[in-house]
Each structure stands twice: as C-alpha cells, then as structure tokens.
Amino acid sequence: MLAALVTTGASAQEAPIDVVYLHDGGMLRGTIVELVPTEHVTIQLPSGESRTLEMSVIEYAGPAAVAPPRERSAPPEPEDEGAASPTNGFGRFSETAAPRRPARERRLRERGRSSDGVEVAFHAPANVSLFAETGRLSGEARAWGSFETMTVESVQYRLVCAGPCTTSLPRAGYKFALAADQRSPVSVGRVPIARDVALYADYASNRAWRVAGVLTVLAGIIVGGVMIVLPIAVAGDDGPNMPLVVSGATVVAVSVSIGLVLAHVGDSVELRVE
C-alpha cells in the first residue's frame, strides 16, 4: 500500500469565475464544482460555502465571461404627458434612455453571445459534457519506506457546457475533454477556436472492460490462492506439492497483471470540428 507525500505545489492557473442566474433574479458567483443536467448544480462561493440548487430554479449556469447579459426592467412610463416627473427634493430630474446598440450587437445579445466571442455549438448526447483544461498540478510522491520518488500530475478542468448546447468562447486554443455522467473527463487534445464552429462528440464507454479487469484480479487471487494454500495445508512428510504451489503463484501474478491493465482502460472519445 502506498502513501503519497506531495512535496511540491505547482503551476495550476486560477480557475475562472462561474455564475448561476436564478429565475427569480438572484445570482451566485463562484466556481461550479458539479453540474448534473436536468437535476442540480453545486457552486462553491468565495467564502468557501457550497450551494446546491435544482435546475428548475436556474436560468443559466456556467462561465461568467460568456454568460448572457441580463435584461434590466425598464423604468415605468408616466400615465400621461402631464404626469409629474420624480424629484429628489431639490428639483426635477429625468432619466436619459440608453443609446440603441447596433443591430449585430443586439442579435448577439439575444443569442447569449458577446461581440468579441465566437459561437460554439456542441452536439452530444444529454449525458456528455464538454470541459476545458485550466491548468495542471504536479509534485513528487514517495512510496512508504522507499527513498525513490515519482512525479505525479493532476489535470484541472472546468465545465464549458452540458450537451447538447450552444455557448460563446473567446478566440483561443482550448484543450478540450469529454465526460459522461459523473466520470472523469477524457482529453481530446487541443482545438483552435477562431470562428463559429460546431463540435460533434463521439463517446463510447469501456466500463465493461474495466469490470472484466476487476473480476479477473479477484478470480486470479482466489484460484491462485487455493492452489498455493491447499498443497501446504495437506502436505505430508515429503512436503507440499511445489509445482502446484508455483502454478498458483503464477496464476495470481498473471491474472493481477492482466486485470489491472483492463481495469484502467479509459473510455473512447472523439471530437470532430466542422
């Protein structure tokens, strides 16, 4: 059994800020740590507190940089032209209407985009989400009782959106990853985003191989263990049946080696850009 002692902190970038808009007009700002489509969102606030909200009360949940602008309600108009305008105790004042935006800017706002971003349409099953790498944590670990160290690395991801969806991203190169249900994201490599694009995700689960790997390890340990223990337990004056003991040890070693390989098979993912 290994006990990892991380001795160096690393170069993770600070996670971007996320926001959650509520239908009642409320807003939460922090880092989204869990998003289950059609169920709930969990966001960690700057104070460290975590809030979990049902999707039924949520208007938008995702990156603050690409969040659609929220429309402010217009001030009430006077009932007639002769209605008195409000005063502040010193005189009358009037509010100046905001200048109209150009047609293109208005259309982008209606579609939840900013004028300096590009539209990304993510086509995927409802249980597949798109993630983007934000940084990496690296360090050194040492096995218990050993003087040798090994380098360990953890990749940090943030949720872009849960498919199928359309969002807006700044023009840049992104290291995307895909994840289904509550599984860990699987990297699909770097994708440059410089124009409006459509991303098509293909996700194939290899859970059956992982289950087969676990069963192979267990079966090998049980069968090999019996082959080792039984000859020793019934050994006579001539000693245990050593060929059987060696065969049992071989069964354990081979089954564990093959089972561990199968148990760590990742899911098959592909992201096509059109």
Image: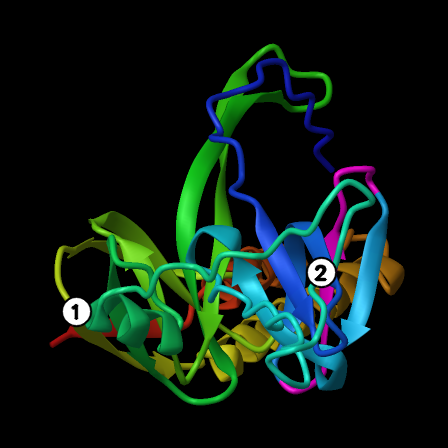
36 inside magenta stretch? no
Q: 78 or 176: nearer the eye? A: 78
Give the residue at the far top of this rendering. 147
**Image depth: mark 2 or mark 1 in front:** 2
Instruction: Determine the image quadrant of residue 181.
Output: bottom right
Residue at which label 1 appears:
196
Q: Is residue 230 left or right of residue 11?
A: right
Q: Residue at x 86, y 46 (%)?
A: 49
Q: Residue at x 82, y 53 (%)?
A: 50
Q: Give, as a single range, the part of the protein colored magenta.
A: 38-48
Instruction: Give percent across and percent down for residue 85.
Output: 69, 64
CA gap, disc 2 and disc 1: 29 Å
Instruction: Determine the image quadrant of residue 273.
Output: bottom left
Q: In what quadrant of the picture does the N terminus appear?
A: top right
Q: Secondary structure at mark 1?
A: loop
Q: Residue at x 44, y 36 (%)?
A: 135
Can the viewer see residue 180? yes
Mark 1 nearby-residue class (10 Å; few <14, some 14–19, many ≥20): some
46 inside magenta stretch? yes
The image shows residue 101, relative to residue 6, as above or below, that is below
Instruction: Give percent across and percent down for residue 58.
Output: 69, 77
Residue at which label 2 appears:
27
Q: Secondary structure at mark 2?
A: strand
Q: 17 or 229: nearer the eye? A: 17
Q: Residue at x 65, y 21 (%)?
A: 6
